[in-house]
Image: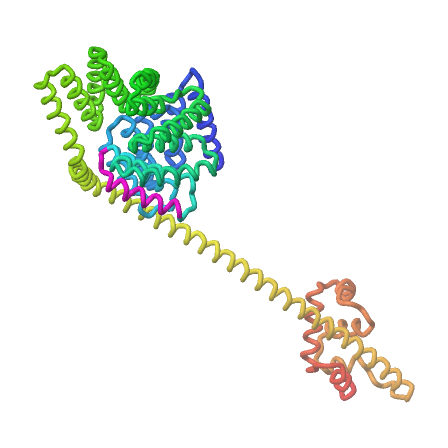
């Protein structure tokens, strides 16, 4: 496991190196990853590799999803769908991105990965805003905000507050929008996050444009521009230039507006942010129209409208037709102006009604994919149950083994102590016999002094039904020999000596030295 993690870490570093150099050999890294065993680490590495590529390799994400489904990695599946949603959003396929984000959320229902859930909720809100479904976007943003507060994740809290602010920009509730943007900005200032500060300054500036507080708008937009120039070495601030152009257009300073749109358009085209490119062309056309540069104005409006149609950006399509209304009205071509007005109204109305339609389509797609997702979740649950049961069985076996080992140790200790006690018992009895035999010798000597020389100890011992060997052992004990010395002297084992001593006690039917002495004296 450690080696596998180390290997993936090396792959990530290699990927980072290639992503920041002219030589981007991502395919060879991808090939190496494919040779590794299927695992959650493999899924994460494939998704990271797509990120390193600038989200340009959907095949990496598809392989990650395939691997995650194969091993029933619920979190991995959610990560893959989140990546697919992000790529769809970048390509202006907002309805598809909503589908992917909702599927990711479905797999995260019981996940403990709160961070990923917050990210998906924020991304889902952003896509729904693009589909003009502000009500549903707000619902998901608030779910994300609740999670961010509970987990005390200020970074995600700031992102989500910014998203909520944009919901209120879309609904033209600018005071509410400013409230949320400023709350987000406070967090980003506290955490010294320049990128977050840039976004919030730009959003606050845009909201002030809509409320016609142009001095405040200019202050915040230029703060955003200053930060953007500070933190980006390779990415120029095209969006800030676009917003500054919009500010001066609304102020009526059309020359300055064209200046900023001229700066914005090549940067936004290079960055392939088509929604802003379309917006910049149309607004530059309107600015040129204001000082009657009719032909360049028409070219810009047509180009912006064409780009808006290619990405199905309804708000920009509606803006483009409104611009054509102004253009044809300036020419007093009221027929074409009316046609353009009808088209503008059609797209404007479609934006208003698009929420319900998108909700139906999105729910239909989710219904069609629900059965497959539920089956994967069920298999993942069963796998987790099997894993838990296997873990329980493993620890049960470990417990039984430990218990058995303890019992064996206890039994060994018990029998060892018992054996030692028996040995001590025999040694004690042996010592008692030696004392008794010494007393017997003393007795014999006393009897001999008194004229009782006819007493024969050997005969008396034989009368006690002792074998010759037992008598020999008894005599040696009486002379003070130890068990080892008796064994050596009689050429027998120590256990045999112990056996003879035991038999002597049994045959004499004694338990203590007084009884032995008494027994011998009575015989």
Quarter holding residue 23: top left
Residue 266 in view (yes/no): no
Report the number of numbered marks.
0
Residue 100's x, y, as percent? 26, 36
Quarter holding residue 239: top left
Q: On the picture, is 476 further left or further right than 145?
A: right
Residue 243's x, y, as percent? 33, 25
Q: Nearer the viewer, residue 68 or 508?
A: 68
Q: Is residue 376 above or below residue 31?
A: below
Q: Is residue 429 above or below residue 517?
A: above
The residue at the point 38 percent across, 25 percent down is 30
The residue at the point 78 percent across, 64 percent down is 485
Quarter holding residue 427: bottom right
Residue 414 in view (yes/no): yes
Residue 55's x, y, as percent? 34, 26
Q: How is the image coloured?
A: rainbow
**Quadrant showing the C terminus:** bottom right
- Dominant secondary structure of the magenta stretch? helix
**Range shown magenta:** 131-149
Q: Nearer the viewer, residue 306 or 185?
A: 185
Q: On the picture, is 349 further left or further right than 260?
A: left
Q: Nearer the viewer, residue 116 or 40?
A: 116
């Amino acid at each position: 496991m450690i080696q596998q993690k180390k290997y993936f870490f090396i792959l990530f570093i290699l990927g980072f190196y290639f992503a920041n150099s002219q030589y981007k050999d991502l395919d060879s890294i991808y090939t190496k990853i494919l040779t590794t065993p299927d695992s959650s680490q493999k899924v994460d590495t494939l998704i990271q590799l797509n990120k390193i590529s600038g989200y340009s390799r959907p095949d990496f994400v598809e392989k990650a999803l395939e691997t995650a489904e194969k091993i029933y990695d619920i979190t991995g599946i959610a990560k893959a769908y989140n990546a697919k949603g992000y790529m769809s959003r970048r390509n202006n396929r907002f309805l598809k991105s909503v589908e992917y984000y909702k599927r990711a959320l479905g797999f995260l229902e019981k996940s403990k990965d709160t961070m990923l859930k917050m990210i998906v909720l924020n991304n889902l809100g952003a896509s729904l805003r693009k589909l003009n479904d502000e009500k549903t976007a707000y619902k998901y943003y608030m779910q994300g905000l609740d999670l961010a507060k509970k987990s005390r994740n200020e970074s995600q809290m700031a992102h989500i507050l910014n998203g909520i602010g944009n919901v209120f920009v879309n609904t033209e509730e600018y005071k509410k929008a400013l409230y949320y943007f400023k709350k987000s900005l406070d967090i980003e200032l506290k955490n010294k996050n320049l990128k977050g500060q840039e976004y919030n300054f730009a959003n606050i500036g845009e909201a002030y444009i809509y409320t016609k507080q142009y001095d405040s708008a200019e202050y915040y937009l230029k703060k955003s521009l200053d930060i953007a120039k500070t933190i980006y070495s390779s990415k120029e601030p095209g969006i800030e230039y676009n917003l500054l152009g919009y500010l001066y257009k609304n102020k009526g300073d059309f020359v300055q507006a064209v200046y900023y749109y001229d700066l914005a358009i090549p940067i936004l085209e290079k960055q392939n942010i088509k929604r802003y490119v379309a917006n910049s062309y149309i607004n530059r056309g309107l600015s040129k129209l204001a000082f009657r540069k009719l032909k360049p104005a028409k070219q810009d409006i047509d180009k912006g409208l064409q780009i808006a149609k290619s990405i199905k950006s309804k708000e920009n399509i509606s803006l483009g037709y409104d611009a054509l209304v102004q253009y044809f009205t300036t020419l007093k071509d009221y027929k074409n102006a009316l046609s353009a007005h009808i088209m503008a109204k059609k797209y404007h109305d479609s934006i208003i009604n698009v929420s319900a339609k998108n909700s139906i389509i999105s729910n239909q797609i989710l219904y069609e994919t629900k059965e497959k997702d539920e089956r994967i979740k069920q298999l993942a649950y069963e796998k987790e149950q099997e894993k838990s049961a296997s873990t329980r069985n493993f620890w049960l076996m470990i417990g039984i083994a430990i218990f058995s080992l303890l019992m064996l140790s206890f039994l060994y200790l018990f029998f060892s102590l018992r054996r030692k006690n028996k040995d001590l018992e025999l040694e004690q009895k042996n010592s008692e016999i030696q004392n008794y035999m010494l007393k017997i010798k003393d007795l014999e000597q006393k009897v001999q002094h008194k004229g009782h020389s006819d007493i024969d100890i050997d005969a008396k011992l034989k009368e006690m039904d002792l074998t010759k060997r037992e008598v020999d052992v008894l005599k040696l004990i009486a002379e003070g020999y130890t068990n080892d010395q008796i064994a050596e002297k009689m050429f027998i084992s120590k256990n045999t000596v112990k056996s003879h001593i035991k038999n002597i006690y049994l045959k004499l039917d004694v338990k203590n030295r007084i009884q032995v002495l008494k027994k011998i004296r009575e015989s």
